[in-house]
Image (cartoon, rainbow, N blue to C red):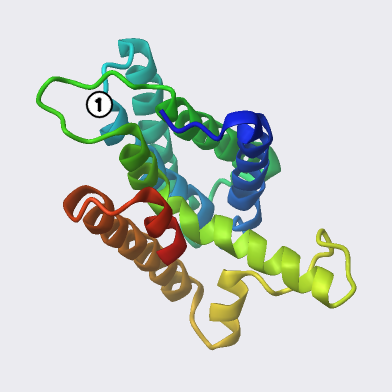
Amino acid sequence: VVNFGKFSGVITVFWIVALTNAINLIDGLDGLSCGVSTISSFTLLVSLIHTDTPFYVIVMIAILAASCLGFLPFNFNPAKIFMGDTGSLTMGYILAFFAVKLCCFNDFRPTETIVSQELFVYSISVILIPVLDVFRVFFSRVRDGKSPFHPDMRLFHHKFLALGFAMRQARWTIFGISLFFWVVNVVMSLVLHWNINIVIAVD
């Protein structure tokens, strides 16, 4: 089990707040927030299947993944329906909750050799882009003497649009980068069995 000792509560709250807001902040392009949530929920589903988690938990994350997949085609440009703040904040919280929940499992199937830390890294890999983007934007705003919540055009998808990418190109490029992080982390963690701290440092 991932255990940060007396800092566990603070880190857990920080993670939930960060991811909840990250999914909300990337909802600036049609289909981007829902797309990242779709990929993330499916990776979480695969991770939870490898544990002896209660069946109802797997059903819950499976429903979330299926809901995102069904919603996604109608959220692509030109979008017919939108997640809005309520949808994106709720989605971010649910993903953060299941990622934390995964760290609470220490019972794996007899044939499994992976540990909970590796599953955690594997599951959050596709969420790293929006989370790291939030940190980058918040710190850059503070550096410039502005509130970290001051709206501007510094987010990752804004940078792609400024470079001349079409909305569709920017969205799929970010999907590709997110999946690249996932592949790299799977190799480092599950194949090479690198220490979790090294994997996070590389990210």
Task: Decide: is 61 above or below 107.
Answer: below
The x and y percentages for residue 197 are 42, 53
Task: Locate residue 133 relative to residue 53 in the image: left or right.
Answer: right
Quadrant in the picture for the C terminus: bottom left
Residue placed farthest to the front in the image? 5
Quadrant in the picture for the N terminus: top left
The foreground one among 97 and 143 is: 143
The x and y percentages for residue 75 are 49, 51
Which residue does the image show at 69% across and 68% down from the upper left? 137
Number of marks in the rendered image: 1
Can residue 203 be seen in this snapshot?
no
Task: Decide: is 122 above or below 103.
Answer: below
Query: The residue tagged with tag 1: helix, strand or loop?
Result: helix
The x and y percentages for residue 132 are 56, 61
Task: Decide: is 50 above or below 14.
Answer: above
Can residue 138 be seen in this snapshot?
yes
Residue placed farthest to the left in the image? 111
Task: Locate residue 76 relative to residue 140 in the image: left or right.
Answer: left
| Number of residues whose C-alpha sits closer than 10 Å to that of mark 1, classed few (under 14), some (14–19) or many (20 or more) | some
Q: Which residue is the site of mark 1?
A: 49
The foreground one among 102 and 59 is: 102
Residue 27 lies in quadrant: bottom right
The x and y percentages for residue 178 are 39, 61
The foreground one among 5 and 191 is: 5
Which residue does the image show at 46% across and 34% down from the upper left? 99
- Give amino acid for label 1: Ile
Which residue does the image show at 26% across and 23% down from the upper left? 51
Residue 194 lies in quadrant: bottom left
Which residue does the image show at 22% across and 57% down from the upper left? 187
